[in-house]
């Protein structure tokens, strides 16, 4: 337990006030506040500074503050070399340098200085169906124009210039940012072209690979590329930041650590134990013999503990009690079997924006199957997937019609995990979606589907005669 908020803020503020030589507060430096109990357990006291603090319970502590050693960055020599853009320009000019990121459904292709593409290929025999979106692109002339512009400004030569940074693997790394525009039009964003912010991060061991790719907002993306090319620029060199320890020992008879911190640890420990207990709840259902009810027999019921019913993941899924979630960008989606498909985004303040992509209606599904007979399940020996129709979603601004989704449940074998699930969401036509659900769990229900692809699984609680105690394990 590191954090006792009021105490940490007190030490932080006091530390800043005593370190007059610091130029402002550096939020890239991390501190751990420890309570070792006695000074004998504290090392490196030679260059340390001491201060006294008092907790909210009037407990007094002597804190040894670590010295912040001057780094090379504090004494950067004048630089007159190439600009950041010129340093990374070689991978733009080669024309064949592309980086890839593979996800469960989509493949992302970043061809530096050219374009960024999101695509998926479906192969059926010799036929290949390609779905792709351009997330941003550049013309070769644009690179030369930018280089000329940056060479005139050369902000990086200003002694006060500080390159923007981000934290990767406990390292603060500087990056140079460009924006690629004029991508495929986005129907969810008033047909504005897709665009991508590309951040080239100084990473000495990098090979121009994609470290991160996410959707910042609707059809606006961010890509982080790890490259060693920037690292020759002194303003973009990486610096490692280990945590610095602030050690505090009690004085005037105070406890080894503040009472509030001890209390917080104890409460946290209780919550952890309670959480572990709640992970496995046992519900006891007692059924009496019908003859006992008739005769009024008051004898104690018989307990049959070997009668255990544990709803499987397949049952929970088919009963709609366990919904599936997908999406890692701005939009995420929720699929509840036999109920609904929803696309949503949650803001930092908790506000949720949602779009209903379709509700399940058995009659409408049957009509859809009749209109699209090729969507019927194939013979059992050839069957690999089932298709279901969800309709009546939110009205689409483009078409004036309710949104609808075809849900494809596909059997995919996975030797490592029999319960893994992969989801993807496509929009081949305006407001007409395809939701793919691929999992080994689907393999278990293929043979249970009727001629329309529907699967109904009843609750399989035993109703044997006799008084029984059934224990149902509920995993939270």
Image (cartoon, rainbow, N blue to C red):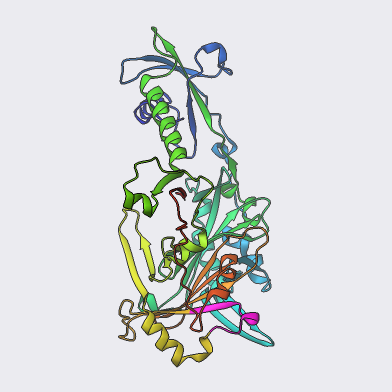
Q: Quadrant of residue 186?
A: bottom left
Of 16 and 399, nearer the camera is 399
Q: Tell me if 364 is positioned left or right of 138 in this view.
A: left
Position in image of residue 463 (x %, y %): 45, 58
Residue in the picture at 46% in, 61% down: 316
Position in image of residue 226 (x %, y %): 61, 56
- Residue 251 seen: yes
Q: Quadrant of residue 264?
A: top left
Q: Tell me if 6 is positioned left or right of 29 in this view.
A: left
Of 188 and 25, nearer the camera is 188
Residue found at the very far top of the displayed protein: 252
Q: Is residue 97 magenta?
A: no
Of 361 and 402, nearer the camera is 361
Residue in the picture at 43% in, 41% down: 278
Residue in the picture at 44% in, 15% down: 256
- Residue 191 seen: no
Position in image of residue 38 (x %, y %): 51, 12
Q: How many marks?
A: 0
Q: Is residue 179 above or below residue 274?
A: below
Query: What residue range appears in magenta?
Result: 377-387
Residue in the picture at 49% in, 48% down: 162
Q: Tell me if 167 is positioned left or right of 95 in this view.
A: left
Q: Is residue 97 above or below residue 293?
A: below
């Amino acid at each position: 337990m590191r954090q006792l908020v009021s105490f940490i803020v007190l030490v932080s503020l006091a530390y800043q006030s005593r370190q007059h030589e610091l130029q402002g507060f550096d939020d890239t430096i991390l501190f751990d506040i420890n309570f070792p109990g006695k000074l004998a357990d504290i090392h490196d006291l030679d260059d340390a500074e001491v201060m006294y603090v008092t907790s909210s319970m009037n407990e007094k502590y002597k804190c040894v503050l670590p010295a912040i050693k001057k780094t090379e960055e504090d004494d950067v020599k004048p630089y007159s070399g190439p600009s950041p853009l010129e340093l990374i320009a070689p991978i733009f000019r080669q024309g064949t340098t592309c980086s890839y990121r593979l996800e469960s459904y989509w493949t992302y292709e970043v061809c530096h200085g050219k374009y960024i593409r999101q695509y998926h290929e479906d192969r059926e025999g010799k036929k290949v169906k390609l779905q792709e979106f351009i997330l941003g692109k550049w013309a070769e002339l644009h690179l030369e124009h930018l280089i000329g512009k940056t060479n005139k400004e050369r902000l990086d030569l200003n002694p006060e210039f500080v390159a923007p940074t981000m934290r990767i693997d406990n390292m603060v790394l500087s990056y140079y940012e460009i924006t690629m525009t004029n991508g495929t039009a986005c129907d969810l964003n008033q047909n504005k072209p897709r665009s991508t912010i590309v951040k080239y991060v100084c990473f000495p061991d990098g090979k121009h690979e994609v470290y991160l790719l996410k959707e910042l907002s609707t059809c606006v993306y961010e890509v982080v590329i790890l490259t060693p090319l920037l690292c020759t620029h002194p303003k973009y060199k990486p610096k490692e930041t280990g945590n610095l320890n602030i050690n505090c020992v009690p004085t005037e008879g105070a406890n080894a650590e503040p009472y509030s911190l001890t209390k917080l640890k104890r409460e946290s420990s209780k919550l952890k134990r309670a959480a572990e207990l709640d992970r496995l709840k046992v519900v006891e259902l007692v059924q009496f013999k019908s003859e006992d009810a008739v005769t009024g027999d008051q004898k104690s019921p018989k307990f049959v503990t070997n009668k255990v019913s544990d709803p499987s993941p397949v049952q929970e899924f088919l009963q709609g009690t366990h919904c599936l979630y997908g999406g890692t960008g701005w939009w995420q989606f929720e699929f509840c079997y036999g109920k609904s498909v929803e696309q949503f985004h949650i803001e930092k303040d908790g506000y949720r924006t949602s779009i209903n992509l379709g509700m399940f209606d058995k009659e409408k599904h049957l009509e859809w199957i009749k209109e699209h007979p090729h969507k019927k399940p194939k013979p059992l020996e050839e069957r690999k997937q089932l298709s279901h129709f969800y309709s009546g979603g939110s009205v689409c601004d483009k078409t004036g019609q309710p949104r609808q989704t075809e849900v494809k449940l596909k059997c995919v074998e996975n030797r490592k995990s029999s319960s893994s699930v992969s989801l993807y969401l496509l929009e081949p036509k305006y407001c007409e979606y395809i939701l793919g659900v691929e999992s080994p769990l689907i393999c278990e229900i293929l043979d249970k589907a009727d001629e329309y692809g529907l699967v109904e699984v009843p609750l399989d609680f035993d109703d044997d005669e006799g008084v029984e105690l059934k224990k149902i394990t509920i995993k939270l």
